[in-house]
Image (cartoon, coloured by chain):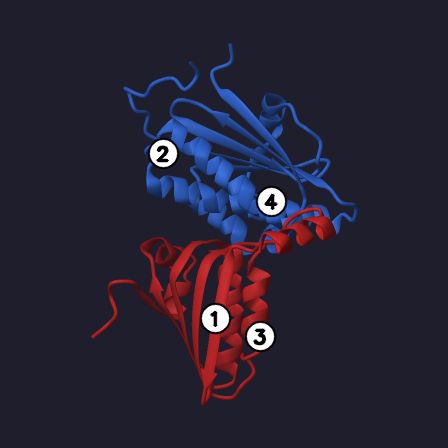
Chain colours: A blue, B red
Amino acid sequence: MRPFDYVEMRVPAKSQYVGVARLTISGLASRIGFSFDDIEDLKIASSEAVTNAVQHAYTEGEEGEVVIGCALYSDKIEIMVADHGQSFDFEETKAKVGPYHDQEEGAFLREGGLGLYLIETLMDEVKVHHQEGVTVFMTKYVGGEQVEEDVETISS
Amino acid sequence: MAFLNACELKKNGVSKKMNIQVNLEEIDNNLTGFIRGEIDAHTAPVLREKLEAYQNQDGLKAVLDLSDVDYMDSTGLGVFVAFYKSVNAKGGHVKLKGLSSRLKRLFDITGLGEIMDIESAGKGGN
């Protein structure tokens, strides 16, 4: 059994679904026990990533889809946002994403502007992967990278 | 109301209800604004469009109340920065007031809190 629960959303690459993704992630995060402030941070970071993906999918032309994958652990949440519409193998994609580099991701940063800066600031780890589109992979720990000892497992 | 929504559904396939409300009133170059709801990629264009109608007036004095904004991200910041730049270029002034600590933090971590005239909730009112 894998050590996390996995929830995936596929939404049309349209701005009205950014809020839907944000609220869903907020609900998932509250199940793990994130604080109010951490959930607000997650809402902003995930909105930024989904907004980028929606805009990127638009520039590609055809009406695309954005895939948002969330892995829920007892002490952290991992969120992947991909703009290429293909459903991904979470662990395979996770293994492929590299650390985020300012210079290499210059184009993405320009597109995202302030957005990627906020993602980096509000999340504990951020990685970006370019292949068949852009995948953003981000992690936030409950209580800021500290593992609580008494957290219950989220899977029943 | 229900009928209207049904029409929207029929026309667009999806209801176009926006979770934002922007009320702007201008008297003698003094613009007072009240913004309510969520400012994200979906709603920011509504706000941008309304503010753009005033941003090229000379010496505009704008005070925007954000006390009922319960969510905002970089798209909202972008709208306020663009408005601030345009108004400043025309010799005017923009003040944002009533910001929750969450909103204030967003301006602070992006460095915009240093540049713009921002008053968070609880601070004001002498």
Q: Are marks 1 and 3 on the same chain?
A: yes
**B112 horizontally vs A64: left or right:** left
Q: Amino acid at mark 1?
A: Asn
Q: Which mark is residue B42?
A: none
Residue depicted at x 54% and y 73%:
B51
Q: Taking A81 as reference, is B66 left or right?
A: left
Residue beneath label 3, please?
Answer: B52
Could you give the CA–CA distance between mark 1 and mark 3, rounded to whole angstroms? 13 Å
Q: Is residue A121 above or below residue A145?
A: below
Contact flag, marks 1 and 3 (Cβ < 8 Å):
no
Instruction: Name the residue tied to disc 4.
Output: A17
Q: Residue at x 52, y 33 (%)?
A: A79
The subunit carrying tag 4 is A
First-in-chain label (4 vs 2): 4
In terms of image quadrants, where is residue B106?
Answer: bottom left
The amino acid at mark 3 is: Glu
Q: Position of residue A124 (x, y in %)?
A: 42, 37
